Image: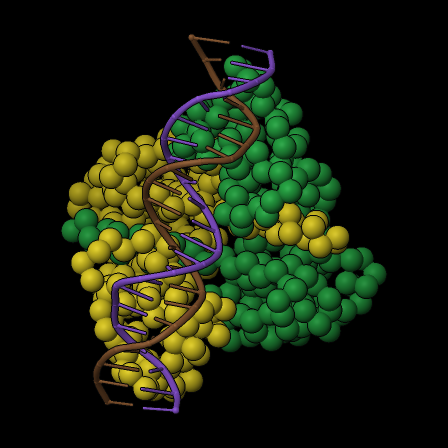
Chain colours: A yellow, B green, C brown, D purple
Amino acid sequence: MAVHIPDVVILRLPSYLRVLSVLEEENAEIVSSRELGERLRMTPAQIRKDLSYFGKFGKQGKGYNVSQLLKELHQILGLDRDWSVAIIGMGRLGKAILDYGDLTPRGFRIIAAFDRDPGQIGKKVGGLMIKDIAELTAVVKNQGVDIGIVAVPPAQAQEAIDCLVECGIKAILNYAPVSARVPKDVLLEEVDPVLALQTMTYHLKSLGC
Amino acid sequence: MAVHIPDVVILRLPSYLRVLSVLEEENAEIVSSRELGERLRMTPAQIRKDLSYFGKFGKQGKGYNVSQLLKELHQILGLDRDWSVAIIGMGRLGKAILDYGDLTPRGFRIIAAFDRDPGQIGKKVGGLMIKDIAELTAVVKNQGVDIGIVAVPPAQAQEAIDCLVECGIKAILNYAPVSARVPKDVLLEEVDPVLALQTMTYHLKSLGC
DNA sequence: GTGTGTGAATGTTTTCACAGCG
DNA sequence: CGCTGTGAAAACATTCACACAC
């Protein structure tokens, strides 16, 4: 399978990982594509096809070994190591992300938090001291930063993103509700729960709610 | 255009809305599909095609009237009214969602917050008193709830979702990092920033980072 | 000339259906 | 048998290219 792997496939792998973790907790040893499909609301064929892009992980007549597949997917996604994350913007949103603490146990170590407001700089949040955004370059150089999370107000988002790009960061998760521009060798993903709500209202409306 | 509208199109409309708002703030009167495409990193043809599913909003030789298109899209998405939202789960995550305050100005009014922990019930967060989850039915009946937001720990997510479904809620935004099941007449959207991070690591890895 | 709206063409993703293995 | 892995077929989405309107 040396063919090109569709982007949608990569987008689905993390959700496979999630159900497999649940199955592992339930002490399931084996799982079939049918059962995975039921839990993920997708067809068994799609799951088999997706996995087949990366290799042959199943046993005919049985299914997939849960913990083995889990390990394979971790490896494929590059999750067999930790990744260093820096957060830019320590307003309410930035603090919530840092404070919520869902990232660290899932392999994303937040190593620094930045703001440009002198009133914030020097304060401690969740055991981390807020640094001046000007120090970003030095932190990237000395500690290494794989991924930047942008949590500044919308009007400052493009500026913050440009700053990350200049520092050589190649992956950015943008929480600000704006479409930002990055050079094409930089990965940019957007998180905006309101977009999800806005597609739901469309469907609710046509249901007559 | 009485044909079926693809789901991906609906998913893109909110992002059109977002750039149009920016353009309106910049006092732009007119915008072409080319300019929209540049800002959204997509082809002009796709934008024209998407919009054409809903009607003819542009003027040949000129482009689209920003504020008019904004209004049309609002209407199409059902955003020309407010929607009532209830949050289930008032731990750190639920508090962050409620407290962050990005929902209200964008048309989603949080009218109630629930938890099942007696230690939380009765407390006030962001001007809202936390209610016992048992009161959900009554609130839905008396005040009306259009959308439920689930912010409970993963292990309780399915239970919370079942509860919302039983109360007759037809749209759920799930922040818990699990794939939940709902009857097919209920809309369920998931928000998990870690999924986005996990696809980025895949790409970072193949870049050799 | 400029830019929309849209069938037709192209490209991509999903589903089908079955050979082959345990 | 049951279930995977996979080419081939079907469904779906995007892009092209041009007629038409301003």
Nearest to the observer: residue A30 or residue A166: A30
| Quadrant of the image occupied by residue A122 | top left
Q: Is residue A116 left or right of residue D5?
A: right
Check the picture and name the quadrant holding the N terminus of chain A.
bottom left
Which quarter of the image is occupied by the C terminus of chain A?
Answer: bottom right
- Residue C15 sits in quarter: bottom left
| Nearer to me, C12 or A80 | C12
Identify the residue at image location x=27%, y=36%. Answer: A184
Q: Residue furthest right?
A: B142
Vertical position of residue B174 compared to residue B17: above or below: below
What residue lies at 45% left-to-right and 69% top-to-bottom? A43
Answer with the quarter of the image where residue A90 lies: top left
Residue placed most toward the observer, A140 or D18: D18
| Whole-percent x, y for residue B30 in the image | 55, 18
Count of numbered marks: 0
> Residue visible at 59% across and 48% down?
B4
Foreground residue among A69 and A43: A43
Q: Position of residue B10 (x, y in %)?
A: 56, 45
Q: Is residue A173 above or below residue B85?
A: above
Eyeballing the image, is A57 above or below A116?
below
Residue B197 visible here: no
Work out whether D3 lies above or below A121: below
> What residue sits 80% from the left and 57% below the top?
B143
- Coordinates of residue A101 in the picture (x, y in percent): 42, 61
